[in-house]
Image (cartoon, rainbow, N blue to C red):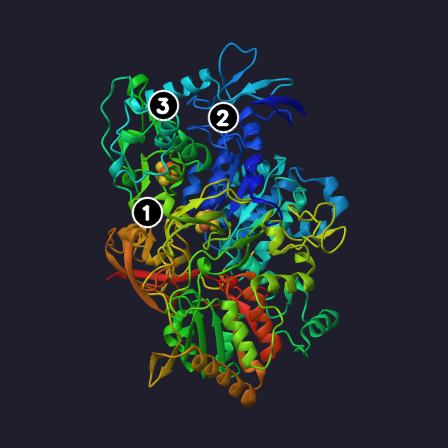
Amino acid sequence: MVSLTIDGRPVKVKKGTTILEACEFLGIDIPTFCHLKQLKAEGSCRMCVVEVEGARNLQISCATPCAEGMQVHTRTERVVSFRRLVIELLLANHDTNCFSCPATGRCKLYQYAMEYGVEHSRFAKYKPHHPKDESSEFFNYDPSKCILCRRCVRVCNNLQANHTLSLKNRGPDTWVGLPFDKLFKDSNCVSCGNCVSVCPTGALTAKAGKSYRIWEVTKTRTTCPYCGVGCQMDLLVKDGQVVGVEPAEGGANPGILCVKGKWAYHFVNHPDRLTTPLIRRDGELQPATWDEALDYVTQGIQKIKEESGPDAIAGFASARATNEENYLFMKMMRAAVGTNNVDHCARL
Amino acid sequence: MTNSIAEVVDADAVLVIGSNTTEAHPVIGAQIRQAVGRGAKLVVAEPREIPLAQDADIFLKIKPGTNIALLNGLMHVIIAEGLYDREYVENRTEGFAELQEVVEDYPPERVAEICGIDPEDLKAAARLYAKAEKAPIFYAMGVTQHSSGTAGVMSIANLALLCGKIGKYGCGVNPLRGQNNVQGACDMGCLPGDYTGYQKVANPEARAKFEKAWGVKLPEQPGLTVTEAVQAIEDGKVRCLYIMGENPLLSDPNLNHTEEMFKKLDFLIVQDIFLTETAELADVVLPAACFAEKDGTFTNTERRVQRIRRAVPAPGEARADWEIVQEVMLRLGYENQADSPEEILAEIASLTPSYGGISFDRLEREQPQWPCPSPDHPGTPILHVGRFSRGERALFKPAHYLPAAEQPDDEYPLILTTGRILYHYHTRTMTGRNEDLNRISGRSFVEINPADAAKWGIESGARVKVESRRGEVVVDALVTDRVDAGVIFMPFHFGDGAANRLTNDVLDPTAKIPEYKVCAARVERY
Ligand code: SF4
Ligand code: SF4
């Protein structure tokens, strides 16, 4: 363990803990653009700088480990003016037409610019932007909003391990692009959307991104309804409708999802959903009340049970229903119907 | 899975067999690729050149249905070259002599012949796996969905045991379960011979325990599996089916037969979120809430119990499955005490040792992997450490390779194998509602090798008729050398051009899994 103070507050942390992590533990907010918890720190955006007594330069908190006796200050004038400079440099080349940007409200550049009182950039715009790529079925890419934090590149290469995105060119000409300047739809992109999930600005945004502002949605932590990996995710809900999905960190998923978990939520609010019980009358399935339907079900079961015994009834439970529902279903078959004819489609 | 997903990124070598991981379990596929990026060696054994094959150090493009020959061949090489873990075999296993005797018959040249691979690749793969310290095996339906599926699963366990790779970090045998809560449905006793946590119906003590807890007399005879139940409709033994959230009329093999059987039923109850192919035949349909509209838990493929939470209201009058079942039980004269998912989970925990320490309250903070017998038990990331469920020692269960039940012949010269694609899930009741996914992949297709395509005058994009002894469908052709000559592949997701009109419903004698992965077929221009 090492002991240090941050903004005058003493704290003990495990050896190897970064200053950023120690701040997080204390609930001290440090701004970051490039930081990605799941990956080794890059320290490229320099937004997270802090002042450490005795050190000549400002230290990058995401990549500096805590040391015994360290005295850290997170909001000195020097720190604040450096962060302002970072924001101004990014803003210089950023398309600030925020009115039409799907990221409005969740954009970190916007948020920090407000917080640090940056309204204009002293620096002149220094490069033309690469064209937009709206070829993906699921998301859009607008390079004029990119701040080169490289989160998307690192997620695509190091977590999704798909190697679609990379930094191209050098110096002021640097941009995030695809091999041979392909469009997303013609590339090896698997549409996992993990690059979109981590973009701190409006450079990579969901196609449906304009349908909600971040302050209009609530988030509910849940488990993906598709395959057996069991990724953790947050459902974004606006007015009782699922409008998006964000990856969360779970035991099985290091903050990433696949194309199904990320985008295939439209079935939830789909007009084809069944909304009322149906009973077959005169050969047609016709709407019925719950009372009618439930009586119909139980009378049907009871009649067959009386005529042919409980083993003439079989129940298929669901590999998609919850544990609790499956438990209750098998209990129904065994305890209420009286047969062990209960199985599910695991084999199929 | 005996081990945890996250361990794979630390692996030295990974063996993937019968699993198209990056498409069917993409986030595990990504983590396998992360491991490769860090220097792990990858061996992939599959009849198709799946995306993961491109990352593989050794890709064994085996003929469909030859897994057991391959696994026996690997073990043959490992024993012949003295690469197995002697100490482990001596101290923790039984039946090595029997294993040796069986795999003796599988020298590399013979296996290469059966599987259609290079014997040197087989040897290299065996060495890679045996010598690696941390080497997990991942497998999926490509191993299980065969008439010899159970033997295939055991052969995988034999291989891991032989190399001392069970009960160790970064190793294990890791079946990837297809659907989100298959693991949970099994754990919950939705099996004809098991109560929760695999407590056997045939065991009088277990039965007495549940009789006492539920306050009723329980039937003694184990029941019928899904596939057996469908067969039993034929002779009138099963007259009523109650189906909750499944769509067998697209997922069952030999669909034409299944459909015929379903029409013979006296009473069909279907409870689902959409009017599926199966619901359309029902006498009564009960509208259910989907995962986003209810509370509960799912258990993933690594035995981790995780919450789902209600985020939106259910549409119209739809109700959660548990509420509906509760109502039906009440009307059948059985009143449940538990009255919420939280209370039901508490009842499960009280009756199921492996879930004993799991509660809604705890799941807010952590998501343990079962067995988790008590509230202070941390859960079990790795099974069989130091001890197997049957005792100190695990038993080798060697099996000989048996060809698939149906082999190509003059009339049906091709082998049809089926599987999943990235953009759809199961019978598409959910993913099929996404227009973007449908634009990427909206129609059934058949993959066919250029040589075969030339033989039958088929071009990519052309409509072709695919036929087996059980049915025929018309789909788009995709000419590709992803499949070898003599083999064709179809995804099973699509209702129009359903692969399962063709598949063979012959069953594995133990697990009763149908042989989806191999049947004889023919194609012609349509
Ligand atoms: S969607 Fe996924 S694969 Fe495609 S560029 Fe983004 S991270 Fe890479
Ligand atoms: S996000 Fe993809 S990999 Fe994860 S559980 Fe869902 S379907 Fe499976």
Q: Which residue is mark 2?
A: A41
Above or below: residue B484 compared with residue B500: above
Q: Is residue A175 left or right of residue A251?
A: left
Dot 3: few (<14), some (14–19), or many (≥20) neighbours within 10 Å?
many
Foreground: B119 or A330? A330
Q: Residue furthest bottom?
A: A307
Q: Is mark 1 within 8 Å of ligand 1?
A: no
Q: Position of residue B182 (x, y in %)?
A: 53, 59
Q: Which residue is mark 1?
A: A212
Q: Position of residue A200 (x, y in %)?
A: 38, 33
N-terminal of the pair, mark 3 or mark 2, is: 2
Q: Which residue is mark 3?
A: A87
Q: Amino acid at mark 1?
A: Tyr
Q: Is mark 3 within 8 Å of ligand 1?
A: no
Name the chain under label 1: A
Name the quadrant of the C terminus of chain B.
bottom left
Q: Are the residues under badges 1 and 2 in a single subunit?
A: yes
Dot 1: few (<14), some (14–19), or many (≥20) neighbours within 10 Å?
some
Residue located at (57% from left, 34% from top): B12
Q: Element type at marker 1?
A: loop
N-terminal of the pair, mark 3 or mark 1, is: 3
Name the chain under label 3: A
Foreground: A297 or B30? A297
Q: Amino acid at mark 2?
A: Ala
